[in-house]
Amino acid sequence: MDWISFPTYATIVLITWLAGLLFIGLPSNKKPLKALGMTLLGLGIIVLVVILTLLWIELERPPLRTLGETRLWYSVFLAVIGIVFYWRWKYNWFLYYSFFMAGLFMVLNIVYPENFNKSLMPALHSPWFVPHVIVYIVSYALLGASSIVAVYQLYNNYIKKSYIQNAIQLADNLVYLGFSFLTMGLLFGALWAKEAWGHYWTWDPKETWAFLTWAVYLIYIHGRIRNSIKEKTALWVLALGFVILLMCWFGVNYLPSASNSVHTYSQ
Amino acid sequence: MNKKRVIWEKPWGYQEGILISISLLLLGFILEVATGGRGVLQLLQYPNNIYIGIGVIICIVILSFFRKKIAIVQWLESIPAAISSIGLLLFVSLLMGLTMQYDNNAPDLIRKLGLTHVVSSWPYLFANLFLLISLGLTSLKNIYTFNWNKLGFIISHVGLWLVLFGANFGSVQVQRLQMTIPEGGISNSAFDPSTNLSTTLPFALRLDDFIMEEYNPKLGLVEHSTGNLFNEKGKSTIVTDSGAVGSIKDWKITVLDYIYSSAKAGDSYHFINEMGACPSAYIVATNNSGKTVEGWVCCGSFNKPFESLRLNNDYSLVMLLPEPKEFTSVIDILRKDREPERIYLEVNKPVVIDGWKIYQMSYDSELGRWSDKTVIELITDPWLKLVYFGIFLMLAGALYMFWMGSKNNTNTVKNK
């Protein structure tokens, strides 16, 4: 990535975020400080969006092909979700964790730089490419945020023996939104697969794991109706769901069956 | 509180659901082993798929009429049944996600259990039937007691039911055929790679031209000791283009001249437009200690040798084969009593002819952009419309959920 010095830009983003979180987390309850903090967080997001835009222009194709490229989008959406849901629910911890995760994904890209490659295989030349991947990444960011809630609440339950009121409602909201995006991503994928590969569903390893992810969240949603399953069980389902989601996103490439996958675009 | 319910005492809940799921799974495996791991493909062959499909619908409709009288039907409409059936399908799919499918080297036991062909195995069929029945009954219950609040629920559930039903019972009727057409040649016969049987089509196809567009090739370093391409994450290749400058390892590489279509004459490369012409570039490479090497590199083609540039004892600069960007078959469709119809077939842009959807599939990869033939795929799926209808209902359901998910949220907060 010679044309943009990615590590420099990424470091700027990380520093603004860190400073923003510090201002928000300060014990003093002064409003201007919080506003400054939020501005810094927003500024970091803008820089990240600029990186993505430059990348798009430089690569002459949507930067959505490789895992590293999708991680950048994930950071953007997770950060935006962190701010929107913090604004709505006022949980500081939720803001910290979502920015921590967004930052972690940026750091991964600094530590493991990819060979930025302009070429896009013919199968990806499609109007479905951008909506399919973007919708998925938004969904992954929402569902990732819901697992933050689950893990935090489980940690409180087991270790600190305390309980945050309404946290599971926040998780529910994240899952509802995330699941609707997940369903759209899955179905866009099916419609695209019919155009590109001739069939809407071939149980390619990536498709199998995408279905598994979808099914776990489907179980969570049904379990939450009228508290049909215990809250603690629901939280475990949510935590497990994210493990399967990560398996679908990154892990599939390491499975023995991945050699047959038509979904391997990394290198 | 009343006394604790014992298992199998009505109304059923999760315990019964888990036991039913496990029993179905075991029964599936037993049947699979008993039939020697042959799966259900034979059983579901057309027209059996139609009979079984109709049987499932009749079964669901009849059961739904007695929903108030039979406790099991009420259970099948319940959340515990929904979660048990999704859970069973999830578990069977997890087995598929963890094992190699259609692996001929798999141990005999794995094959006999159906784990090499999960989608056509008994456990998978049972999991789907359980889900179809539970989902079907729930959908019907809500249709019988329709009110506008249930609209989102009904469209997403009916949509999923149609997709599962169509995909499960329709897949055996999908026909995927392949046809190879030489440039200038005509073909009306396609073969099924799974059975090797040929089919004569009601139309013929003539390939007028095969056009391929390629990306500019990349330049990289090959390590002499291993013969491998030097790979340092981030910077290990440069895209060839006139005037391009880049660095790999400690070498600064400048492309002075780039010819997309060329051949060697004497000591240098010249533009030429003939079969097998290949990309070449004139390179100047300088390393940190000031050593400069210059010369031609070429990636070669099926009839031209490649040429690399030796930098020092350890490394040579090479040009990699260009990657395809787009390929198009210019095809005339020939039908009785009709004028030939010209189509341009590209990846991702299939064309429908008389009920067949035809796809650009492949070409002679050895010849690359000089390929003198095209491979196309012809597919029919009589159940596709049903599945698509289901998919669009599910999409509408997802949008509804997106909308209502946040509305429900405001309501909960207002109530507090």
Image (spheres, helix red, strand yellow):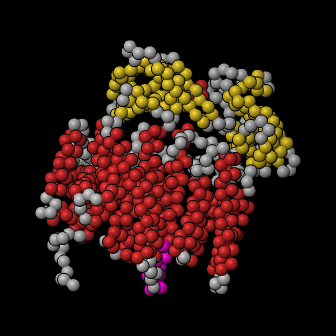
Instruction: Please report the residue visible at 36 percent of the width from the left and 70 percent of the height from the top.
Output: A224
**Quarter that holds the N terminus of chain B:** bottom left
Evaluate whether residue B166 shows in this view.
yes
Farthest residue to the top: give it.
B337
**In the image, residue B36 above or below residue B372:** below
Residue B128 in picture, x, y percent from top left: 28, 53
Q: Is residue B141 left or right of residue A179?
A: left
Front in this rendered view, residue A78 or B194 = A78
The quadrant in which residue A218 appears is bottom left
Residue B166 in picture, x, y percent from top left: 30, 44
Q: Is residue A171 left or right of residue B172?
A: right
**In the image, residue B190 above or below residue A52:** above
Give the magenta part as a residue range: A149-161
Instruction: Please report the residue visible at 71 percent of the width from the left and 22 percent of the height from the top.
Output: B272
Instruction: Please report the residue visible at 52 percent of the width from the left and 58 percent of the height from the top.
Output: A138
Query: Is residue B325 magenta-colored?
Result: no
The quadrant in which residue A113 appears is bottom right
The dominant secondary structure in magenta is: helix
Q: Is residue B219 left or right of residue B85?
A: right
